[in-house]
């Protein structure tokens, strides 16, 4: 998660001339250079308050099954070498909902693939190895119980579908490629809902499989930012989007407090700042 520095500690805007001579991204807007500051409202960034070339000039961004798989291999080895015991790992994030209201928090009972099957298929050498994607049911129930102590906090347990792609793989009509009709998209998503799928993301199957094989108690908690039966793109206001994105953090922070015996601090929960 990105952290925002206080204004007094933020690096200032770099000299534009320092980046001349390289092939830059060309923006077709003659007014940008005349602006004193360009604020990227939805990213909470600004050209004066943040050193954008330093922060994003060489971005190494990870998303989806390959990235989380690499991270988990090394995290699990770290836990082993550190001799950690009774470890619980919880993945939190955002997702697209299916047939549920935006802002709903889905606690995954089983991660399923694009065929709605509870499995993760890993190619090992020249073999396809199939692994179970069941998650800890008791942990899911504990998290659901904890969510009921938070006012106005819609939460449910359901299947989460994990895909290898954000666009065609999730039945979106707004990608660079689209090889199906809107009717086929809706038919697919309705069949997913009938199979118990309540949200879609891109990491849960490998997360569930690896944690299960290594004996780790694990859960997946994701907030939904839209109902994919209604739309392919998010149309929430910035403030609502920020509040929704904090919901998994709020639930897990309260769950941790409860595990540590700090329940008295949960009587009036408020969004946490990360």
Image: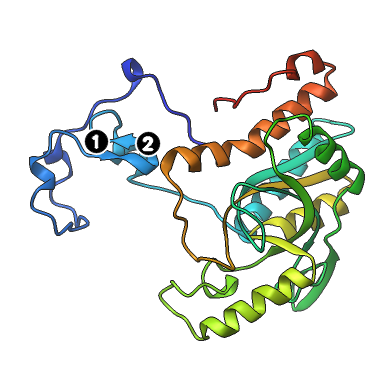
Q: Can you tell which quarter of the image residue 206 is in?
A: bottom right
| Direction from residue 102 to residue 40 in the image, left or right | left
Where is residue 38? Give x, y as percent.
Answer: 21, 39
Query: Where 6 falls versus 163 (above or below)?
Result: above
Query: Where 229 falls versus 29 (above or below)?
Result: below
Where is residue 261? Give x, y as percent.
Answer: 85, 17
Residue 268's tag is: none
Q: Nearer the viewer's eye, disc 1 or disc 2?
A: 2
Residue 177 or residue 127, whichever sits in front = 177
Q: What residue sits 78% from the left and 76% below the top? A: 128
Residue under numbered circle 2: 44
Q: What residue sits 52% from the left and 85% below the top? A: 181
Q: What residue sits 32% from the left and 15% below the top? A: 8
Q: Tag 2's secondary structure?
A: loop
Kindly report the distance in space between the C-alpha atoms of the residues bearing marks 1 and 2. 11 Å
Q: Quadrant of the C terminus?
A: top right
Residue 47's tag is: 1
Q: Tag 1's secondary structure?
A: loop
| Direction from residue 270 to residue 116 in the image, left or right | right
Where is residue 243? Give x, y as percent.
Answer: 54, 36
Q: Quadrant of the N terminus?
A: top right
Please say which color scheme the image uses: rainbow
- Dot 2: few (<14), some (14–19), or many (≥20) neighbours within 10 Å? few
Residue 164 or residue 246, whichever sits in front = 246
| Direction from residue 167 to residue 128 in the image, left or right | right
- Dot 1: few (<14), some (14–19), or many (≥20) neighbours within 10 Å? some
Residue 111 or residue 132, whichever sits in front = 111
Q: What residue sits 74% from the left and 73% below the top? A: 125
Q: Can you tell which quarter of the image residue 54 is in?
A: top left
Query: Where 77 falls versus 133 (above or below)?
Result: above
| Direction from residue 258 to residue 164 in the image, left or right | left
């Amino acid at each position: 998660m990105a952290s925002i520095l206080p204004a007094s500690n933020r690096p200032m805007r770099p000299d534009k001339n320092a980046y001349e001579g390289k092939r830059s991204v060309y923006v077709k807007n003659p007014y940008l250079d005349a602006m004193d500051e360009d604020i990227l409202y939805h990213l909470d960034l600004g050209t004066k308050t943040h050193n954008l070339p330093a922060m994003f000039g060489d971005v190494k961004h990870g998303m989806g099954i390959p990235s989380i798989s690499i991270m988990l291999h090394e995290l699990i080895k770290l836990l082993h070498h550190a001799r950690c015991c009774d470890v619980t790992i919880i993945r939190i994030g955002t997702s697209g909902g299916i047939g549920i209201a935006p802002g709903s928090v889905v606690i995954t009972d089983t991660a399923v693939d694009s065929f709605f099957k509870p499995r993760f298929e890993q190619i090992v050498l020249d073999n396809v190895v199939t692994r179970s994607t069941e998650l800890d049911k008791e942990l899911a129930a504990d998290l659901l119980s904890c969510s009921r102590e938070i006012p106005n906090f819609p939460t449910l347990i359901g299947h989460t579908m994990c895909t290898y792609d954000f666009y065609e793989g999730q039945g979106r009509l707004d990608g660079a490629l689209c090889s199906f009709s809107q009717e086929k998209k809706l038919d697919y998503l309705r069949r997913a809902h009938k199979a118990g799928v309540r949200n879609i993301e891109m990491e849960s199957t490998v997360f569930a499989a690896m944690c299960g094989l290594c004996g780790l108690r694990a859960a997946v908690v994701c907030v939904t930012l839209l109902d994919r039966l209604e739309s392919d793109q998010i149309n929430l206001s910035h403030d609502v989007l920020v509040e929704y994105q904090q919901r998994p953090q709020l639930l897990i922070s309260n769950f941790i407090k409860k595990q540590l015996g700090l329940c008295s601090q949960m009587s009036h929960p408020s969004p946490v700042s990360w």
